[in-house]
Image (tube, rainbow, N blue to C red):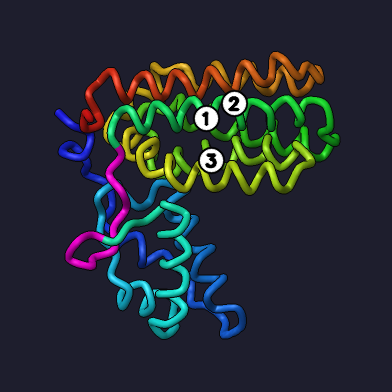
Amino acid sequence: MHLLSSYSGMSSTQALDQLPILQRRTLGGSAYDHLAELLVSGRLAPGERLSLRDVAAALGVSVMPVREAVSRLVADRALEVAPNRAVRVPVMIASGFRALAETRMAIEGLAAARAAQHRSEPQLAAIGAAEAAFRAIAEQDTPDRGHAVRLNRDLHFAIYDASGLPPLREIIVGLWLKAGPVLNLDLRAHPERLRHGSAVLHHAEALAAIRAQDAAAASTAIAADIRDAADFIIERGGLPED
C-alpha cells in the first residue's frame, strides 16, 4: 500500500487554521515563510491541494501576496501547478526520493561536521535540549505524531544553525521543502518508526559527536539518520514507483 493511501493526518484546511494573521509589511515574504514552514514541518502532505483564497483568509491578507509566495515555492519545486491549474504539493516517486536523500546525506552531513567544529556552548545546549525533547516524545506509548515531527525538525535545524554557514542552512531548507512532506507523512502513518526506528539512536550519536567536537562522527550520524529513514519509507512501498 502506498504511503498516500494510508494517510490520515490533518487536512490542508486544518493546517491553514494554524497560520497566524500577518502584519501588512513584507506580506509576500511572510506568506512564503509560513507556507514553507507548513511544508518543512510536514503539515502538508504529498498530493494535497492548496486554495490561494483559503491561505489568504487564514493569513488575513489579500490573494496577491499569497500568489507571490506560491510562485516562489513553485520555482523552488516545493509546490507545483497541476494541468487544471490547481496548486498542490508534489507527489515524489521512489527514485526521486532516493536521490534527494543522498543529496541530503552529503549536504546535511557537512553541516553537522561544521557544527561539531564551530558550535558555541549555548548552541550545544540548544542541540542537547532538542535531542532530549525528541527522545522523550519518541519513548511515549502514544506520542503526539505531529509534535514529534516538529521536534525532529527542531533538532536537525538546531544542529544546522550551529554550522556557522547561513548559505548552507538556506540550501538545507530548500531540501527540506521537498523532503518534509514525505518524511513527516510517513512518520504520521507509521508511528512505530518513532519507537522502533533508529532516529533516537542516531540523534544521540550526533549529539555526542558534536559535544566531543568530532566532525566525522557527527557527519556519519546525521547521514545515517537520513539514510535509515529513506530506506524505511522506500522498502515499505510508501512511494509510487517510477
Contact between labelled residues 2 and 1, with CB atoms less than 8 Å apart: yes
Residue type highlighted by circle 3: Arg
Asked if marks 3 and 1 touch (Cβ < 8 Å), the reply is: no
Nearer-N-terminus badge (2/3): 2
Q: Amino acid at mark 1?
A: Thr
| Label 1 SS | helix
Is residue 71 one of those drawn in magenta? no
Report the Cα–Cα distance between label 2 and label 3.
18 Å
Disc with the residue nearer the chain's start (3 vs 1): 1
Q: Nearer the viewer, residue 228 or 76?
A: 76
Residue in the image at 34% along x and 52% along y: 44
Q: Which residue in the structure is indicated by mark 3? A: 153
Give the residue at mark 1: 103
Tell me the residue that label 2 is attached to.
106
Quick one: quadrant of the N terminus?
Answer: top left
Q: Quadrant of residue 242?
A: top left
Element assignment for label 2: helix
| Residue 233 occupies quadrant | top left
The region drawn magenta spans 82-92
